[in-house]
Image (tube, helix red, strand yellow):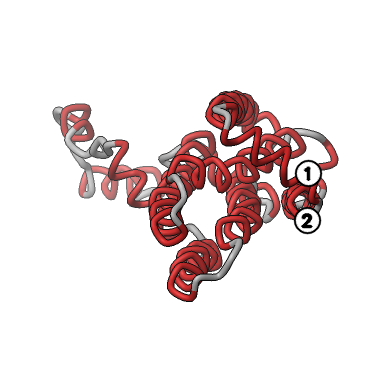
C-alpha cells in the first residue's frame, strides 16, 4: 500500500458529512437583544467608586448643614458640584486614557454606546443629587427649592460645558486632568462672586429675579449640545 492509498483510507474512515441546516443552527445562537435600561444597569458597576463616594459626600454635607444650621450650605454644595461633572468627564474618557478604545470598539457595545450610557448615568446622578439636596436645604433655611436648585446646578453645568469642549481638543485628549482644572476654575469663580459683597448682591438679584431659571435652561441646552458633539466624535478621537 503506497502513501496516497493510505491517506485515502484514513480520509474515508474519518469522513464527516456536510453539515445540514448550518445557517439555521447558527441563527439560533445570535446574541439576545439588550434593552437600553439593561445596558445602563450593566454599565453602573464600571463607574469607579470615587464617583459614588463624592455623590454620597454631597448629600451628607447637605443634610449635616441643614441639621446644624450651617450658613451657606447651599453655596458649599454648589462649589463641590463642579467636581461631580469633572469625574463624569473622566469616566467618559477612561477607555482612551488606558488605550482600551480599540478593544471596546470591537465588543458587543460600541464605544459610542458606552460613552452615551455613562453620560446618561452621570446625568441621572446629578439630577438625583439636585432633587435630594435642594429641598433639604431649602426647607431647613426657609429658601425656595427652585432657587436652591439653580444655585447648585449653574456651577455644575458650566463645568460640563467647559470640560466637554476641552475634552474634544488636543489639549484635553492629552491631559486627563483638564476637567479637574476646569472644575477648580469654576469653583474659584463662584467663590469670588459670593465672597464679594457687591458680587453676592448682584448674584442674588439675578437669580431671584427669574433670570436664574433662564440661565439654567440655556446652560442645560449648551451642555446637551456639547454632549452630542462629544458622542458624535468619540470614535474619531479614540
Residue 27: x %, y % from top left: 21, 31
Observer-nearest of 63 and 233: 63
Q: Is residue 112 above or below residue 7?
A: above
Q: Quadrant of the C terminus?
A: top right
Observer-nearest of 79 and 104: 79
Q: Name the residue tied to disc 1.
A: 199
**Quarter where residue 222 is shown:** top right
Observer-nearest of 219 and 160: 219
Q: Is residue 205 visible?
A: yes
Q: Is residue 232 visible?
A: no
Looking at the image, residue 48 sits to the left or right of residue 86; the answer is left
Looking at the image, residue 79 sits to the left or right of residue 170; the answer is left
Q: Are marks 2 and 1 in contact (CB under 8 Å)?
A: yes
CA–CA distance in space, label 2 to label 1: 8 Å
User: Residue farthest to the right?
Assistant: 171
Residue 17: x %, y % from top left: 18, 36
Name the residue at 50% across, 71% down: 69
Name the residue at 59% across, 27% down: 211
Name the residue at 54% across, 65% down: 54
Name the residue at 39% across, 52% down: 135
**SS for tag 2?**
helix
Q: Is residue 67 above or below residue 182?
A: below
**Mark 1, other Cα within 10 Å: few <14 / some 14–19 / many ≥20:** some
Question: Which of the numbered marks, if any, corresponds to residue 111?
Answer: none
Observer-nearest of 156 and 108: 156
Question: Which of the numbered marks, if any, corresponds to residue 195?
Answer: 2
Residue 36: x %, y % from top left: 32, 36
**Mark 2, other Cα within 10 Å: few <14 / some 14–19 / many ≥20:** few
Residue 81: x %, y % from top left: 60, 53
Amino acid at each position: 500500500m503506497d502513501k496516497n492509498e493510505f491517506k485515502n483510507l484514513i480520509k474515508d474512515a474519518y469522513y464527516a458529512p456536510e453539515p445540514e441546516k448550518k445557517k439555521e443552527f447558527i441563527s439560533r445562537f445570535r446574541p439576545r437583544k439588550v434593552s437600553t435600561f439593561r445596558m445602563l444597569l450593566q454599565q453602573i458597576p464600571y463607574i469607579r467608586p470615587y464617583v459614588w463616594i463624592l455623590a454620597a459626600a454631597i448629600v451628607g454635607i447637605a443634610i449635616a448643614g441643614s441639621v446644624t444650621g450651617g450658613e451657606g450650605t447651599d453655596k458649599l454644595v454648589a462649589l463641590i458640584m463642579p467636581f461631580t461633572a469633572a469625574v463624569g468627564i473622566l469616566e467618559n474618557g477612561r477607555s482612551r486614557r488606558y488605550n482600551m478604545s480599540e478593544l471596546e470598539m470591537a465588543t458587543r457595545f460600541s464605544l459610542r454606546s458606552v460613552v452615551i450610557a455613562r453620560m446618561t448615568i452621570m446625568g441621572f446622578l446629578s439630577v438625583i443629587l439636585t432633587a435630594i439636596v435642594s429641598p433639604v436645604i431649602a426647607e431647613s433655611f426657609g429658601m425656595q427649592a427652585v432657587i436652591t436648585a439653580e444655585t447648585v446646578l449653574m456651577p455644575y453645568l458650566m463645568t460640563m460645558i467647559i470640560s466637554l469642549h476641552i475634552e474634544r481638543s488636543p489639549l484635553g485628549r492629552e491631559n486627563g486632568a483638564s476637567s479637574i482644572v476646569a472644575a477648580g476654575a469654576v469653583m474659584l469663580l463662584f467663590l469670588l462672586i459670593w465672597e464679594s459683597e457687591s458680587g453676592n448682591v448682584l448674584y442674588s438679584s439675578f437669580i431671584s429675579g427669574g433670570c436664574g431659571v433662564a440661565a439654567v435652561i440655556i446652560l442645560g441646552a449648551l451642555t446637551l449640545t456639547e454632549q452630542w458633539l462629544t458622542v458624535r466624535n468619540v470614535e474619531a478621537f479614540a
